[in-house]
Amino acid sequence: MRAAMTSPPPRVATGASASPRAAAPRASAASTTRGGVRAASGSDDASDDPASRVLGWLARATDDASLEGKVALRDLGDGRGRGLVALRNLAPDEVVFSLPWDLVFAEEEEEDPEDPEDPARRATRVVDPDDPSAEHEDSAPMPWSARMAMRLLEERARGDDSPLAPWIAALPSRVSTPPLEYDAEDVAEAEDAAIDAEVAAVAFAHADACLELEDRLRAIGCDADDLRWATGVLHSRCFTYGARGRHLLAPGVDMCNHDAEAKNAVARVVHSPETCQGAVATSEIAPTTEENTLINRTPAGASESFFQLRAGEDGVEEGAEVLISYGDWPNDPFFLYFGFVPAGNRHDAVVLFDTVDALASCAVRLGLIEPGEASATGIRKASEAVAIGKSGDASSAAKTGSDRGLVLTREGVDGGVIAACDVLGVESWVDLVEGRCLELLRAYRTTLKEDRALLDAATAEGRLDAATAIAYRASKKEVLLGPVAAGRARRAAEEAARQTA
């Protein structure tokens, strides 16, 4: 098992994000559709389906008559929903379409929740959804998604006067994600305390935003349900861009599905040379790193900036689906905010230990160290070793922007586990990891084999929210079973060697 520094993220194309689907052989309807582009009844190109008309609108809006000859929105079959399909071979780095900035629905740049003078950081009422009368003042800013959702609803209320009207009409009528749409029973199927906490936090934030925006909602004939819909759209379709992670919705690009392994296209923001003052003119939509933060402001002239979908370095073959990557994240953000679980995601992760203290306690439980060796001094020194190890992995820290403790992925264990074991005197970090995996597996109420049967049953019955939650749970078990299987194989090999000696 390879040691690797890992930690989960915010999202690349978050909500964060890019678009509908990840290839998944099991429970495809639950785990591959992002709730974005849905097949109309039966045919690939139903003329009365707003989604099928978006590319034509884009071709006219961008004055690109060739667009509709490059890609089409097609039903992918096997319950996978819809996706963009190449109508001819697309050359490497060929522009599929290029949106001028006035067609990009972007987070307002002047809104800075870190600025205490910014109106977005005003005191807000925090409300318990179960007890609306219980409220208190709080200085937390309104979430970016609520602010953008309100603007999206106001844009929708303009009707045909909105330049984005054809795209808005094609947005899904429901975006099913755990924080906003799942029943409590379906959320519970994930069996994950961190998921439960995030769902509760988003529910509180949504209730608070509904109160804060009540007058604006009423003015356009909308209510809390409309705000929930728009927030779900934002969560599941937004890209992030620039050093601050500005949120962008890009019509047309949001039809692209996700596949981190088979991606054949990229989404980029491009600026004309005169607005860059000699700097690099192209920034790929990706996790925020030093490499892609040179251009992080929208130029004053909207026509000088473009959001582009381009073919990848190998191009796209005729008939192939145009796929992008929403990011190399664990399944948590995909499940919470995109509403699907990528099958076999090699970046999925499980938190083994929240702290070094928890690691030391586990080592004592497993008999790997004596209780006295897990002293406060030893734990402090081990924590320092972990911090040094993590700070040495600057590229990973910049990419993920998050630290959820000491984690295990399908590809290896957090290097911090090894560093802490060295300081605490744990002779075999491999035994510690295997023992901890067994503890976590035993805490589940079902086995992986049972989960697969439950997943098939929920999918067959059309209980897609439950199926997605079960798929999330099953993936975590697959990660945990890696070290367990490796340990059993190692012991079997050692026993075979002893018998032949």
Image (cartoon, grey):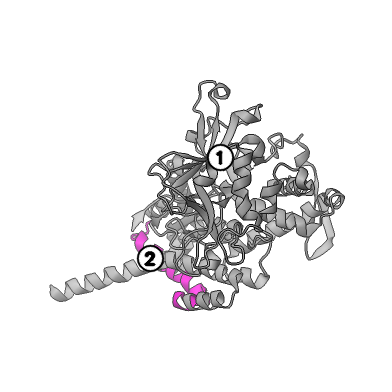
* Residue 484 numbered mark, or none: none
Residue on which the image places disc 1: 65
Report the magenta residues as a range: 425-451
Measured along the vertical axis of the image, is residue 158 above or below residue 32?
above
**How far across and how far down the image is residue 344, in percent?**
43, 62
Residue 461 left/right relative to 136? left
**SS class of the residue under badge 2?**
helix
**How far across and how far down the image is residue 427, in percent?**
33, 60
* Residue displayed at 65% across by 60% down: 175
**How far across and how far down the image is residue 262, in percent?**
41, 53
142 or 295: nearer the eye? 295
What amino acid is labelled 2 in the image? Gly
Residue 238 in view of the camera:
no
* Residue displayed at 49% across by 75% down: 451
Residue 64 in view of the camera:
yes
Q: Is residue 445 magenta?
A: yes
Q: Is residue 450 magenta?
A: yes
Count every numbered label the image shows and give the total. 2
* Residue displayed at 49% across by 60% down: 342
Q: State the CA–CA distance, disc 1 to disc 2.
A: 51 Å
Measured along the vertical axis of the image, is residue 387 above or below residue 320?
above
User: Circles 1 and 2: CB distance less than 8 Å?
Assistant: no
**How far across and how far down the image is residue 470, in percent?**
54, 71
Judged by depth in the image, the label closer to the viewer, 1 or 2, is 1
Q: How packed is label 1: few (under 14 Cα within 10 Å), some, or many (20 or more)?
A: few
What amino acid is labelled 1 in the image? Ala
Residue on which the image places disc 2: 482
